[in-house]
Amino acid sequence: MKTVRGTSRNFRYRLPLAAAFAVILVLHAVPAEAGTGAGPGNDVSWPQCGKALPKGQAFRVVGVNNGLANTTNPCLATELSWAGASTGGTGQPKVALYVNTANPGSAGAWWPTSNTYAGTTVANPYGQCNSGSFGAACSYMYGYAKAYDDANSRGVSNPASYFWWLDAETGNSWSADKAANRADLEGMTAYFASIGATAGIYSTSSQWSQIAGTVPSSSPLYTSRSWLAGASSLTSAKRMCSSAPLTGGGKVSLTQYVSGGFDYDYSCI
């Protein structure tokens, strides 16, 4: 989704893959998916605040954050209301959410110092998070905390009812330690699982390789659904459904393409 977000420890900022292409919105006829009679999906976030949003989508994905993992999309309520008018007809939920992700370590505004967050002591598979540590244990807690905030502090009602996509891009702040980055995303996945929700991963294969590397089969990320960005048309988005998923045990569920200034999403399931 190309969102505006913080980057590696030198704090670059730029637009998410889904939202960057959709900054200028003009109502656009929705092409139908061949053989289904259902239109594709569409994703929006903070860059679309105050803009005319497209109509007739089969499903819609709304960004929860305002470009960074510790912020809130100021138009979240409006965009969720818009998303509720999705028509259905694909294997996707009519409304899903996506969140910005990061693993900033000392470059972040906040970093965990224990395995406790929001009054809960978390069972951390990487051991004890201690002050001044930036390895897997504290990265796991950072991810857990950001997912907790996304579900409880952004204005999302009934967060367990949604499918949550983790937007992983190199424009975010990430550690050079890929294992720590995987732990961070595992922490997010673990929190969503704790409330009965499911999470998948949005990225490109090249960005995912830089951030997380090869995900071992022992990781909870291994079977995650993939949402692949980078298609140039509906035709190429359909072909991309046959691409390798981001994780070895996962499957490609969505692909993203651009048409008429909008970000569209093709359901592979």
Image (cartoon, rainbow, N blue to C red):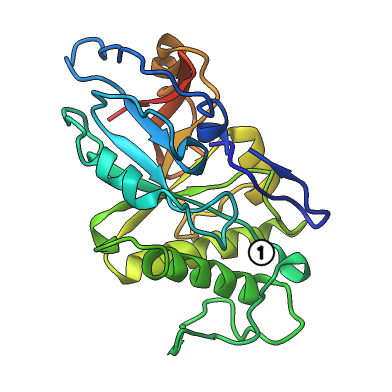
- Left or right of 34? Residue 151 is right
Whether residue 267 is visible to the viewer of this picture, yes or no, is no
Residue 180: x and y, percent?
A: 66, 64
Q: Residue at x 69, y 70 (%)?
A: 109
Label 1: few (<14), some (14–19) or many (≥20) C-alpha neighbours in 10 Å: many
Q: Is residue 192 above or below residue 8?
A: below
Out of 67 and 253, give the one closest to the viewer: 67
Amino acid marked by disc 1: Ala
Mark 1 residue element: helix
Tell me: residue 209, above or below residue 141. Answer: above
Seen at 63% across and 38% down, the residue is 15
Q: Is residue 106 above or below residue 172?
A: below
Say which residue appears at 28% left-offset and 53% top-offset: 162
Q: Is there any visible trace of residue 28 in the rendered image? A: yes
* x, y percent for residue 8: 76, 53
x, y percent for residue 160: 26, 62
- State the residue at coordinates (70%, 63%): 104
Give x and y (percent) for residue 260. Answer: 46, 13
Comparing 99 with 135, the one in front is 99
Q: Quadrant of residue 93?
A: top left
Quarter of the figure that contains the C terminus: top left
Residue under numbered circle 1: 180
107 with respect to 207 (left or right): right
Can you name the residue that lies furthest to the right here?
10
Q: Quadrant of residue 138?
A: bottom right
